[in-house]
Structure formats: structure tokens, C-alpha cells
Amino acid sequence: MTDVGGGSAAGAQTVVGGASEGATTGSRARLECSEITVNFGGLAAVSDVAVAVPPERIVGLVGPNGAGKSTLFAVMSGLLRPNRGKVILDGADITSERPQLRAAKGLARTFQHPELFSGLTVRDHLVLAYRAKHARRRIWSDLFTMGSLRRPGSHENDSVDELIEMLGLGRLALRPVLGLPLGSARLVELGRALAASPTVLLLDEPSSGMDSAETEQFERTLRLVNQERKVSVLLVEHDVDLVMRLCSKVYVLDFGLMIASGSPEDVRADPAVRAAYLGENLKVSEASGSEDLSSGPRTRTPAGARVPAEPVKGGTQAPELLVEDLWVRYGDATALHGISFKVDAGKALAVLGANGAGKSSLARAISGLVSPARGRILLGDEDISAWPAHRIRRSGIVYLPESRGIFRSLTVTENLRMAAGSIEGRQTRKEAIERALEIFPALASRRRQQASLLSGGEQQMLSLARALASFPKLLVADELSLGLAPKMVDLVFDGLSRAREAGLTLVMIEQYVHRALEFADECIVLQRGELAWAGSTGEAHGEVLRHYLGEAMVAAG
Ligand SMILES: Nc1ncnc2c1ncn2[C@@H]1O[C@H](COP(=O)(O)OP(=O)(O)OP(=O)(O)O)[C@@H](O)[C@H]1O
Ligand SMILES: [Mg+2]
């Protein structure tokens, strides 16, 4: 949980930098940093980096997972003191200033993983953030009476209402944030940052986990804020098309170094950027062992993601997974209304639909985390519908939750050892771990690092590596490409293809519609808890998607 003024600096290394040289007045940029260097032990997370955000512009910052983007944000917002370098806000050196002071001067940020107060409503979050900036004296009494905020004044009411409207959160305004879909939680985070009326906004992967409607809403809001409220923005984002649409300038970090900067078109065409980040030229066949295309160990192709050593085929004609007339209820609310489908062994099923359509409920029901109110779930010929989650897990179904299934206080190796714990034989366990790490060289070089200190994308890789290290029969993955850089997404899908060839069956929930359809064999579309369409992925193009998912989703896929 963070306070409204910022986040916790837990785990951040604090290094007192050199003395400030005073204000560099006359600077044209609103926010500027130069010669920023951050070392974590032996790791140079950011090396001699300079970034400038001019007034009223939206500037992009992209780069592979672990490139140093969030580290740079931590430096700019004051959660981390750099080993070297300066941060300038509106011409004044703020390198030594506390985060709260920076916020008071107009700098606001969102975090890669939204951390909201679970008991407060969406509206309360915005009210608190508004008060933190505009009525600081009230904030203390509010914090002691959480859950029953003092009545807002009329100006405050108008501002908060306007924000809620702008973010399209009206329907959710009075709901506690607990259980909110990730995309909506991200809009709340954005609202919280905007409630402080910032002049400069730092956004760390704001759209990841948003569905197409939420992304549209986000994009509209950001343009409005930028054009009407004259807010300058620095945007970290892996949705490259979104960056291209919104930004007038883009910076590209790789391994802590600035490898390119310029107009979105120039940056996209830059061969170094394509090799390190976009991976668009990297065909699967070229990738194997091709040194000239890889810019370092992290970009090397997965060496062999053969997941189960013994393909698990079931030996019969029965589908690997059969779901019949599945109903899921939470109290009075029905999340799934009689869903039926099957997935054959070694095949992949894509589950599509807007946030809130029931996709995650389906994943939770298959993995035994919620009990079906009605219906049957069969794994092979065993009815698992009434089994507890741990028994389902032991039978070979691994669930990869949207919120990442990792132990944050354990190291990378400890996380993987736990995942492989049920495999018989020390040597086999060791091999399982090594094989999972082959897909993710970035993790292999972070074996002893605590999971909570990994970058967002590295945590997602660890979550996947854990899933694969346990040799599942069936992988149920909720947004497995969440937070991964485009090239990493390619490598992950490449690794999954090999796993599928070796017999892994997959149920994948994905926001990257086209990507999922390219990969999967079958597809189902959920709409408000009902099965709206089912068929082979070959039939699921054009009209079908437009009809069920809307224009935006087809375009964005
Ligand atoms: N406190 C820390 N201690 C040690 N290493 C750290 C710490 N924080 C970050 N790192 C490492 O520094 C590198 C940069 O991390 P950072 O979070 O800045 O990456 P990022 O560009 O935001 O990546 P992503 O796109 O995956 O979020 C990563 O390799 C990460 O493991
Ligand atoms: Mg990050």
C-alpha cells in the first residue's frame, strides 16, 4: 500500500549524489535529467542517461525488460538518489529534493503495479489525492477515519466528478477498488495522479492490462490532459502502436544505455532498436543461434523450451480439457453462465473478451480457485470440478494468474526450486529449472536476486518460468504477455510453441488478440459471462471479431 504522495522506497538503494550546482534557469524543458547513473551492486541499471520533456509534449520512453526505465522514473520522482547526475524541474535542480516536495512542485507519477487502498472506493482515492495537493490539512484526519472520509467541499466535488467523467469511471465510482480489473485499477491510478493537478506526469506502463475500451479511454484522457490542461508527459509503455500514436519524441533505453532517440518513425526504423527491442526482423528460423541479430545475452533465442520431457497425450481420444455447462457465482452476481468447450491435448485455446467478461473467472474455476455453482470440468477422463486447488495443481494444471504467481521475498532460484519441488529426482528437478531459464536469459543472470527487486517484465518472466519448470499438462495463462517488451513476447510465444509440440495444452487469456489468434488453434469469445462465439482461430478474423470485440480491438490487436 502506498500513500497518495508516492510509493515506498523499499528495496531502493539510496546513494547520496554530488552537491547540486544550483538552478539551470532558462531551460526550455519542463523536466530534464542529465548524466543519470544508477548502480545496484555490480549492476549498472542506468548509465549516463539524459532525457528532456518539453512543455505540453508527450514523450515516450521504451526499451526491453530490465532496461532501466522504472529505475529512471524512481530517480525522477525522488524515490531513488542516483549515483551521479541531475534532475531539473522547471529550471530548478531538484536532485536532492524529497518526493513530496517534487509532487508539490507539480510532478506526479503512476506505478507499474498499481497499489491502491483495497477498502476505499474509486472516488475516495481521487478525493484523497485531491486533498493531498489542495487541502493538505484535511488529509491527516481523513487517514485516521479511512472508509468514512469527511464530506468534500463543492469545488473539490466538481473537480473529482470531472475527473471521474473524464476517465469513464462513473459506473465504478462508488465501488471499493478491491477486485477491480487491472485495467480499471490503472485508470484509478491515473486519476489519482491527475487529481494533484500536475504539470508533469510520469506514467509507467499505464495501459498494460487494459482492454481495448479502457485503452481508448486512456488515450482520450491523456490527449485531453495534454492539450487542455497543458500537462507534459513522459510515457513508459510496451504498446508500441500507442507510443507511436501519442508521442512526439521517443527515447530508447537498452541495458541502462540510451541507444536511440528521435521521432517515433525514425526510432521505429532504427536497426539497433529493432534488434534490441522490437525484434520485428527476428524470424524464428533466423533467431536460432544467430549472433549478428542479437545485441546481447538477453536477446538470444530460447535454446530449447521443451517442457514436458514425456509428452502427455492422455492416450485416449478424450480431450485434455472438457468444460460442460459451467456456472460461476460470487454471491448474487453470476460471472459465468453455462459455458461449454473442449481443448484437445497439445492444442491451444484463446479466450477473448473485454475486461469483466468472465475470462479470469473461467481460469480460476479450471484451477479450482473458485468452485463452480454448476457444471463439470474434466481433465482427461477425471472430473476435477469438486477438487481442491492443490489437488488440481498436482494433477498437472498450472495457473498463471494476472497478478503474477511469484514469492516476492524469495530469490529467482528459490522461486524456481519451489515450482519444480514436486518433480521426482534431484537431477530432473535441476534440469527442469535450467530448461525454464533457457527461455529467459535475463533471469539466468539474476538467479540470486530477490524477486521483488526484479523489473516488472522480469517478474512476469519468473512467473512463466515457474509455470514451465513444473512440467504442466495444461497451462492456464491469464495475460501471459503482460508487461513484456515486444521482442520478449516473440520469444515467449516461440518457447510456448515448442512446449506445445512436446504435448503441453494451453488455455490462454490474452489482450493481444491477433497474437493470440496467430498462436492458438481454437478460440472462444466471452461476453458478460456468456459464450458469444466459439470456433477455430482460422475462422475468427474480420467480421467475427468486429462483431464481438468491437472495431478498436480488431485495430489494436
Ligand atoms: N533494487 C534493486 N536491486 C538490484 N537490482 C535491481 C533493483 N531494482 C532494479 N534492479 C534491476 O535493474 C534492472 C533495471 O530494472 P527496471 O525496473 O528499471 O527495468 P525496466 O526497464 O523498468 O523493465 P520492465 O520493462 O521489465 O519494467 C533490472 O535488471 C532489475 O533486475
Ligand atoms: Mg519497469
Image (spheres, grey):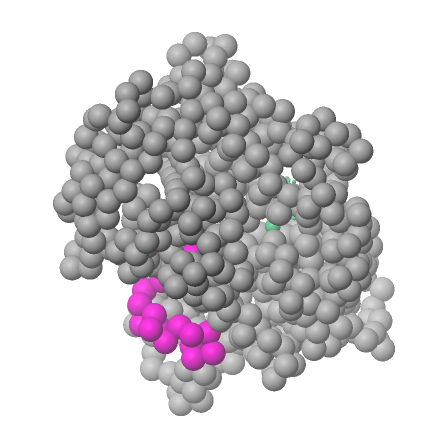
332 magenta-colored: no
Compared with 487, 434 (above or below) is above
- 104 or 514, which is in the foreground? 514
Q: Can residue 507 be seen in this view?
A: yes
Total numbered circles: 0
Give x and y (percent) for residue 162. 45, 83
Give x and y (percent) for residue 128. 43, 72
Q: Could you say which quadrant of the image residue 109 lies in?
A: bottom right
**In the visual, does 527 lie left or right of 470?**
left
Give x and y (percent) for residue 465. 51, 31
| Residue at the image point whose x is 65% and y is 68% from the top | 246
Compared with 70, 377 (above or below) is above
| Residue at the image point whose x is 47% and y is 78% from the top | 166
Give x and y (percent) for residue 408. 48, 38
Compared with 371, 185 (above or below) is below
- 464 or 319, which is in the foreground? 319
Which quadrant would the N terminus be assigned to in this image?
A: bottom left
**In the visual, does 6 lie left or right of 117?**
right
Q: Can residue 186 be seen in this view?
A: no
Q: What are the residue bounds of the magenta stretch?
A: 164-186
Compared with 94, 158 (above or below) is below
Check the image and name the residue furthest to the bottom.
Answer: 154
- 21 or 414, which is in the foreground? 414
Task: Point out the quarter of the image occupied by ligand 1.
Answer: top right
| Residue at the image point whose x is 38% and y is 56% from the top | 353
| Residue at the image point whose x is 55% and y is 70% from the top | 219
- 425 or 271, which is in the foreground? 271
175 magenta-colored: yes
